[in-house]
């Protein structure tokens, strides 16, 4: 593309060439003003194009700052979240010792059963079957509750270093999209923590209900074995 100086130079050459006398030819009339105006318009056009190119680059930069993936969703990806039973079926299988999906809970529960036992296996075997079953059920419920509390405490304590990743990521949020992703990731983590707290509360209530159920079953077994105490000493007619 010719610049303005080139156009002026060519215009001058053209004016000089056409303005020299040629035998048997007419004098050529050159509108120097029109050529100068044309050169001026070309210069303005070049400036407009340069300004438009700068605006386009700025718009592209702004577009990139609000689109794309900044990788914030992968933060804290190594946290184990499903370490708690998700339903009554898994809870009952844990209580019965037939669930191998929750390794940490199983290990903690077995440790609690062993460490909290007072009666020896021989003493337990000498009890009536109903009494032994009731005692074992109470042991398992208490041991599972202790295992859940201990495992939750361990996970919560170990989460502090991983949550530091979210804090450190604040300095790396260099544009609007990164900041929005980080904010969304923090909100998602808060939601998951609230969900975990809700599950812990519900599990505690479920194990309490299991304990009450065991107590009620034991009372019914006593009544079934000995009859009603209110009528025990009533003379038979």
Image: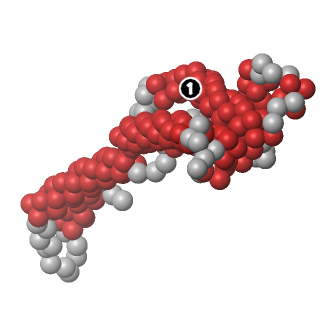
Write down the quadrant of residue 157 in the picture.
top right
Q: Residue 207: image x %, image y %?
A: 58, 38
User: Helix, strand or loop at disc 1?
Assistant: helix
Task: Judge whether 102 appears above or below 32 on screen.
Answer: above
Residue placed furthest toward the bottom: 24
Residue receiving disc 1: 156
Tell which of 13 and 131 is nearer to you. 131
In the image: residue 69, left or right of residue 35: right
**Colouring scheme applied when the structure was drawn:** secondary structure
Residue at 75% across, 41% down: 130
The answer to whether residue 4 shows anywhere in this view is no
Mark 1 surroundings within 10 Å by alpha-carbon count, few (fewer than 14), some (14 through 19), many (20 or more): few
In the image: residue 25, left or right of residue 55: left
Residue at 18% across, 65% down: 19
Residue at 78% across, 47% down: 98
The image shows a total of numbered marks equal to 1
């Amino acid at each position: 593309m010719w610049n303005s100086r080139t156009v002026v130079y060519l215009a001058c050459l053209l004016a000089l060439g056409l303005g020299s006398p040629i035998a048997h030819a007419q004098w050529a009339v050159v509108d120097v003003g029109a050529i100068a105006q044309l050169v001026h318009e070309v210069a303005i056009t070049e400036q407009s194009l340069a300004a438009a190119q700068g605006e386009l680059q700025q718009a592209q930069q702004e577009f990139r700052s609000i689109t794309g993936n900044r990788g914030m969703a992968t933060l804290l990806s190594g946290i184990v979240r499903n370490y708690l039973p998700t339903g009554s079926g898994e809870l009952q299988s844990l209580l019965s010792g037939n669930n191998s999906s929750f390794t940490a809970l199983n290990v903690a529960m077995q440790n609690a059963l062993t460490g909290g036992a007072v009666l020896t296996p021989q003493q337990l075997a000498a009890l009536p079957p109903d009494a032994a079953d009731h005692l074992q059920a109470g042991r398992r419920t208490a041991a599972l509750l202790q295992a859940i509390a201990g495992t939750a405490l361990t996970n919560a304590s170990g989460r502090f270093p991983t949550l530091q990743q979210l804090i450190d990521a604040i300095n790396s949020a260099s544009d609007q999209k990164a900041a929005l992703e980080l904010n969304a990731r923090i909100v998602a983590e808060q939601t998951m923590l609230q969900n975990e707290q809700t599950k812990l509360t519900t599990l505690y209530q479920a194990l309490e209900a299991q304990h009450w159920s065991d107590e009620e079953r034991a009372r019914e077994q006593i009544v079934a074995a000995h009859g009603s105490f209110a009528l025990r000493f009533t003379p038979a007619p």
